Amino acid sequence: MRFKASLLHFIVMSGLALTALPVLAQDRVVQLVGFGDSLMAGYQLAPTESYTAQLEAALKAKGKNVVIANAGVSGDTTTGGLSRIDWSVPDGTDGVILELGANDALRGISPEQTEKNLDTMIGRLKERGIAVILMGMLAPPNMGGDYAERFNPLYDRLAKKHGVPLYPFFLDGVASVSSLQLSDGMHPNPKGVETMVERSLPAVESFLVDIGNRAK
């Protein structure tokens, strides 16, 4: 103890405190949960190739002290997500990356129902003091223009209603690019996920800043 006190006294007296002390102090780990469907779960990919795994690695490479749990379930709709949102996101979670709706669109589920489910999920997370970033989705072309007009704007409306950040299209840069997709033409391959991470990284970094500001 006497040695530690002497070392601290030396640091302060030598004018090194401002530079040395932050190096000695470790920031608290930010706990995130990626909550979504197969696009989040990493369909047919190794665990290290999923969006959450690649995003966590990218953030850590930039010096961010963050852990991202993968709560993606392949085939999940917003109705399925709503049924498990409370127990799939543990207490102590700082933020949720919310990505759902693609399967709703593929199944032709009413966009109004999709919006209602997402609205309820965001509200429940906010009630628990958990920050949310909403990952947008676009309706597939085969669903027709009328469906797209009803489906596509719902994410922007929800983001504005709840005051949460929105990343407009989770598959940006990957949709319709065969070299970045699995053979099914729907899910990203590892390179596709890498592209998704690269494009969404600035938005997630800003999200982490928001979480940090909330904690002050």
Image (cartoon, rainbow, N blue to C red):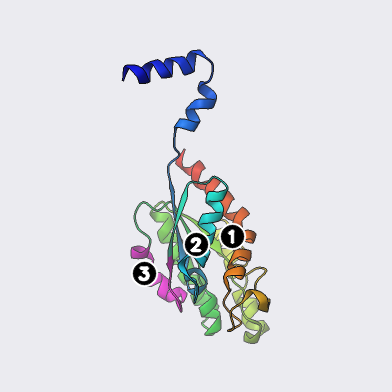
First in residue order: circle 1 vs circle 3:
3
- How far apart are the alpha carbons under marks 2 and 3? 19 Å
Q: Which residue matches tag 1?
A: 166
In terms of secondary structure, where does tag 3 sit? helix
- How far apart are the alpha carbons under marks 1 and 3? 22 Å
Local packing at callout 3 (Cα closer than 10 Å; few below 14, some 14-19, many 20+) is few
Q: Which residues are magenta?
A: 71-88
Q: Is residue 125 above or below residue 211?
A: below
Q: Is residue 148 above or below residue 8?
A: below
Residue drawn where x is 32% and y is 16% of the image: 2
x, y (%) of residue 212?
Answer: 50, 43
Q: Is residue 169 above or below residue 93?
A: below
Residue drawn where x is 45% and y is 41% of the image: 215
Q: For the view shown, which residue lies furthest in the top direction?
A: 13
Identify which amino acid the numbered label 3 is placed on: Arg
In terms of secondary structure, where does tag 2 sit? helix
Q: Is residue 200 magenta?
A: no
Helix, strand or loop for the magenta stretch, by majority = helix
x, y (%) of residue 50?
Answer: 51, 67
Name the quadrant of the N terminus.
top left
Identify which amino acid the numbered label 1 is placed on: Leu
